[in-house]
């Protein structure tokens, strides 16, 4: 017979593992987020890759970080009309002033 209030070692970790395992979709994949997706507008072209260092992009371009669904990218993009290149599935394109600048959709 167990005393009331006796702890079972590691039970919290087992419960946490089951909860986290339930957060995955089919075949262990993490489910897609319901956030707004950033995409490149039709006919728009991105500049060369950059590393985020100052003055690395050609004149008129700025180094920007964004994710078009295939993972994070850092590329030179037209400046200052950066959001003219992108569209969001919902919300608006926003530019976060950092270096490199970050292009996101509002509400994400």
Image: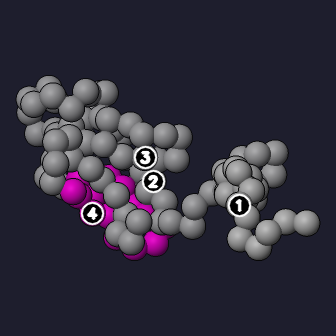
Q: Residues within 10 Å of mark 4 (few under 14, many from 20)?
A: some
Please identify the quarter of the rendering in which residue 27 is found. top right
Q: Which residues are magenta?
A: 82-96
Gap between marks 1 and 3, in whole Å? 45 Å
Residue 74 at x, y percent in the picture? 32, 35
**Of pointers 3 and 4, the one earlier in the residue sequence:** 3
**Of pointers 4 and 2, the one earlier in the residue sequence:** 2
Viewer-nearest of discs 1 and 4: 1
Check disc 1 and report its element: helix, strand or loop: loop
Residue identifier under label 3:
67
Identify which residue is drawn at 15% across, 54% down. Answer: 97
Gap between marks 2 and 1, in whole Å? 51 Å
Residue identifier under label 1:
7
Identify which residue is drawn at 35% across, 69% down. Answer: 106
Check disc 3 and report its element: helix, strand or loop: strand
Q: Residues within 10 Å of mark 1 (few under 14, many from 20)?
A: few
Q: How many marks?
A: 4
**Of pointers 2 and 1, the one earlier in the residue sequence:** 1
Q: Contact, CB < 8 Å: mark 4 with mark 2? A: no
Residue 81 at x, y percent in the picture? 19, 55
Residue identifier under label 4:
94
Quadrant location of the N terminus in the rendered image: bottom right
Residue identifier under label 2:
39
Residue 93 among magenta residues = yes
Q: Residues within 10 Å of mark 2 (few under 14, many from 20)?
A: some
Identify which residue is drawn at 21% across, 47% down. Answer: 101
Picture layout, residue 16 above or below residue 46: below
Q: Contact, CB < 8 Å: mark 1 with mark 3? A: no
């Amino acid at each position: 017979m167990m005393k009331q209030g006796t702890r079972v070692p590691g039970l919290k970790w087992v419960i946490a593992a089951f909860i986290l395992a339930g957060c995955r979709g089919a075949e262990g994949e993490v489910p897609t987020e319901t956030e707004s997706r950033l995409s490149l507008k039709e006919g728009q072209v991105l500049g060369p890759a950059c590393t985020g260092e100052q003055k690395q992009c050609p004149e008129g371009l700025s180094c920007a970080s964004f994710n078009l669904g295939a993972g994070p990218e850092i590329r030179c993009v037209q400046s200052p009309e950066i959001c003219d290149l992108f569209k969001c599935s919902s919300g608006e394109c926003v530019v976060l002033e950092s270096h490199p600048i970050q292009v996101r959709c509002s509400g994400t």
